[in-house]
Amino acid sequence: MGELNDSFVKLAKLKGEFVWHHHEAEDELFLVIKGSLLIKLRDRDIRVEQGEFVIIPRGVEHLPIAEEEVHVLLLEPKSTLNTGNITNERTVPHLDRI
Amino acid sequence: MGELNDSFVKLAKLKGEFVWHHHEAEDELFLVIKGSLLIKLRDRDIRVEQGEFVIIPRGVEHLPIAEEEVHVLLLEPKSTLNTGNITNERTVPHLDRI
């Protein structure tokens, strides 16, 4: 949706459980626009409600879970792949621009 | 309020007219948390309502105006000075952390 220095501003609709992953060299910001997002870390859970944001630092394994559909704004370096250190059918290598 | 790669996530309360300035090498994101922010550019005005954001690209002169108090979240490189290319009594060289 936008570019900011070395980062992209991304919009995503999430539903269901994503996949455990981390980003080797990139911090990632999730801002919840609509709904409620659960982010599991290895040692605790974070609940991010509408209007709240969380920063997942580089290297931290996380598992986003959207029990109901959640709309999020993401801020990530342009180099960030959604599935981080893993590649599977959920990986989105090419993004649409709106 | 947070760090994200080479940027800070900042919170600010704005009231009144700021000062015309630009940032030489840094894009800047304003997300309006509460209220309504007017940003004047040299060729047009942008009205940013609650829940909306705008990115001001590097080099673009802008003048934020908060007719009423506005709460904003800012995303800027750590190197960004609030008054950009100028220094005056509104310049905040050292930021509080919360």
Image (spheres, coloured by chain):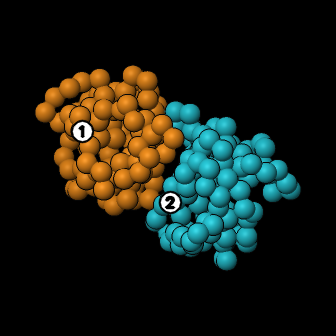
Chain colours: A cyan, B orange
Q: Amino acid at mark 1?
A: His
Within-10-Å neighbours for mark 1: few <14, some 14–19, many 20+: few
Count of picture labels: 2
Residue nearest the observer in this picture, B39 or B89: B89
The residue located at (39%, 22%) in the rendering is B24
Disc 1 designates what residue? Answer: B94
Callout 2: 10 Å neighbours few (<14), some, many (20+)?
some
Dot 2 falls on which chain?
Answer: A
**Chain on which label 1 sits:** B
Q: What mark, if any, has residue A54 been given in the picture?
A: 2
The quarter of the rendered structure image containing the C terminus of chain B is bottom left
- Image spot of residue A23 (x, y percent): 66, 48
Specify whether B11 is left or right of B4.
left
Label 2: element kind: strand
Q: Are marks 1 and 2 on the same chain?
A: no
Vertical relation: B88 (above or below) A82? above
Which residue appears at 52% of the width and 37% of the height?
Answer: A4
Q: Residue at point 23% right, 34% down?
A: B93
